[in-house]
Image (cartoon, helix red, strand yellow):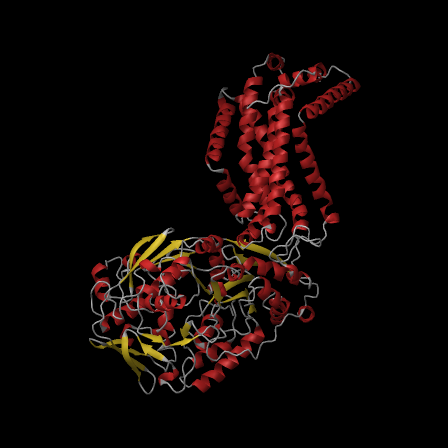
Amino acid sequence: MLRSSLQGIKVESMNHRNRTNGLSRRAVIKSAAAAAAYSLLPKFGTAESFAAEATHTLVVAAPATPQSLDHEFDVSLGTIDTVGALYDNLLEYEKIPDPQVPDALREDIAVHSDQPYNLNLKGKLAEKWEISSDGSVARFFLRPGVKSNWGNELTADDVKWTWDRKLHLTGLGPFQAGVLNITQEDQIQVEGRYVVSFHVPKPNPLLLKQMVNLSNPVYDSVKCEQVVTKDDPWAHKFLENNSAGFGPYVVSQLVRGQQAVFKARSDYYRGKPYMDTVIFKEVPTSATRLSLLQGGSVDIAQFLQPLEYTTLKKVSGVSVDAVKASFAVWVELNAKMKPFDNLKVRQAMNYALPREEILKTVFQDLADKQTGCIPDIYPDFTDKFWTYDADLDKAKSLLAEAGFKDGFKSTLSYDAGNPVQEPIAILFQTALRKIGVEIVLNKVPAATFYDFVTKREQPLIFYLDSPWVPDPGYSTQLYFNSKSYVDYSNYANSEVDDLIKSGLQTLDPTVRNETYTKAQQIVMNEAPWVFIA
Amino acid sequence: MPIKNRFNAEPTSAVWSLILKRTGYGLRYFVQFLRVYPGYAAGYVVVLTVALVAAVAPVIAPYSPVNADASVYLQPPTLAHVLGTDSTGMDVFSRVIFAPRIDLAIAVIGTLVSSIVGSSIGAWVGYFQSTTGIRSFSSNAIMRAADVLQAFPVFVFAIALVAVFGQSINSLVLAIAFVNIPIYLRLMRSQVLRIRDMRYVEAAYILGVPDWVIIGRHIVPNSIAPVLAQLSVNIGWSILLTAGLSFVGAGVRAPTPEWGSMIAMGFPNVMTGQWWPSVFPGLALAITVFGFALIGGSIEFLADPRRRRTLASGKPPLPTPA
């Protein structure tokens, strides 16, 4: 799994302004982390220099400004960062110190048998919550007096409107509701001004986890209903450029391709954030983001390259911390295309990948080997089925068994916008050449790349992703359920489908562990991906 | 074939001796020219060296230009890797000397195709300009089409063509040929417009020589000099275009050794202090293009009869025009 390296590593650098105002680096970081409302950068580490803390303005050099503020239809990273600042969820995980970097706080996503529903959660917009004994009803009691950025009070109607919207639109919503088996409006019921309940046909271990998911924040339905039109009954056009939520920030300017400016809300129910103004500047090249950071023109440089972090380590006044993350990069082996419909060929591809070299050169040892098919920090992850350490002889003999003694030719597509994919591809190509497999490298622009991924017509294509709900059921449902829209490798195994489904219908942690361990065993053996990092 | 005989009055051996004699003059002029302007000689030396190195690259390259070796990634220039290694451990020197095989081939073939096609069409268009009927109409239509082609920025147009044809070396050749055609078309047309009113052309016309023979035998040979001068400059420019396309990812596929794609691949490392994967291919590119520009300049010089005469007379050279 990638540590935050790909998505950024927490890098703290002190410039002279930090020192002169007497604030300690940690104090700044902590207050910023708390106040910026785990905020614009909730999960991704970054490089920070805090050039402008004196004025409480945070300048972020980002690869792209948000394209849309309506997360229903935009999953780009700029939008994801933004959604966390503009909106709040019903629940959140308790924070714990990161095991490797104790100064960094991270979500406690482990299974806690001693806690209600086995989760270490705390309320955010919901004060308290309960699940019925048969697991079919989840009831949330909302915090009274919480105001949106339009001054409307949070009520149960807002939560219902939010989920009804998911059911009516065709973006992320149907999936987010679907994993909870919610398909009808009447499954979300308003039981009082501050009480809302979710009714699911079978016990669902994701019921609470989905309320933490960044994709499921609560909208201000009063404001949204004021702006709906006949053609736009769910306020999509409004929410693309504005926000109507209960989060700590509001948008004050959005010039796509240039910058987005966010202002802190003084009436935020958990207190005004430390940073008054947060500015996202679009700086597409990582080298430029790095130089802006080093020059002190920006406080945070997002998504630097591994080698750039290594370089930063050598700069005095900069420390580089790496924390584990759920993002991973892999190559999809299209199981519906020859020769990757052959299990032995897929396994051979895994044995041929020079993983250690890639970790060392491309990731500068800032990433870990991807030894399983779900993120290694998620509950129920196991690496005991890992067998694919680089072994060209084994790869060659597997190819011979599969009837490709002399190798074969294929094409590997990768994203021109992602600088780590090309060197990985070149190292992989060189290794494959040694066992007679010739792959042509097909570099495609980002837009074409995602089109290629979703069409599933490429024999080999990179993919980089993170399942956002820390749950083995959610992760495997996304990538390995043959009916999932994210099953980009066309992997299909009815036994795995059944295991995923049954694990999503029980709350018993032991049964879930056994179920998903079995599912991981099958998937790892059948190798639908070339596991990388 | 009375007409052919009339225009081919000299016996074959006499034609050859004339050609040899003229070549002799030409060579003498050329040597004299390089003596007086040794700067231009550098262009020929550079281009010949690049072509030679490209030809023997498989023999002299110490490593494979496409095999990655993670154990030696991003090594600065050393004895083992004289120009260092890139981020995947490929030897920069081997790649730099293999690259012109691709770059020169694409640029030379692309430019030759565009010059042949462009000048042929240009000759046709110029010859029939301001006549009547379908031939006039077609020559006007071709000129307006050339206007449209030239209205697009060349680089953007080339990217679009590569996108349409698909990313391959053939597509690059096609794209380069296509974007250059209007240049040769206009150049040839302007020459032909001047030559076609010459007495000897009119004489041939009156004698009943077919149009295509007049164009091929009397007009084109007398209009070709500026096209030849343009060729060299254009090859250098096409190398830049090829490299530019590869730099933005629309050119050759990685890891094919090609200067533009090498610069692009090494670019992220420049910021982190490893300048060699980018700078050496950049230098090679710059020097080669400079070489072609010098050759282009010299051809332009030699094609100018006034300067040629001054040179032959042994008088002090004329100042280089600004």
Q: Which of the 4 image quarters holds residue A349? A: bottom right
* Residue at 43 percent of width and 53 percent of height: A283
Number of residue marks: 0
Residue A207 position (above or below residue B85): below
Residue B162 position (above or below residue B273): above
What is the x, y in percent for residue B104?
64, 40
Residue extending furthest toward the right: B13
* Residue at 67 percent of width and 52 percent of height: B65
Depth check, front residue: A193 or A24: A24
**Residue A418 in the figure: left or right of residue B99:** left
From where the camera sits, is residue A411 visible? no
What is the x, y in percent for residue A251?
29, 58
Residue A348 position (above or below residue B228): below
Depth check, front residue: A209 or A299: A299
Depth check, front residue: A456 or A396: A396
What is the x, y in percent for residue A59?
37, 57
**Residue B163 in the figure: left or right of residue A281:** right
Question: Quick one: quadrant of the C terminus of chain A?
Answer: bottom right
From where the camera sits, is residue A210 visible? yes
Residue B279 position (above or below residue A139): above
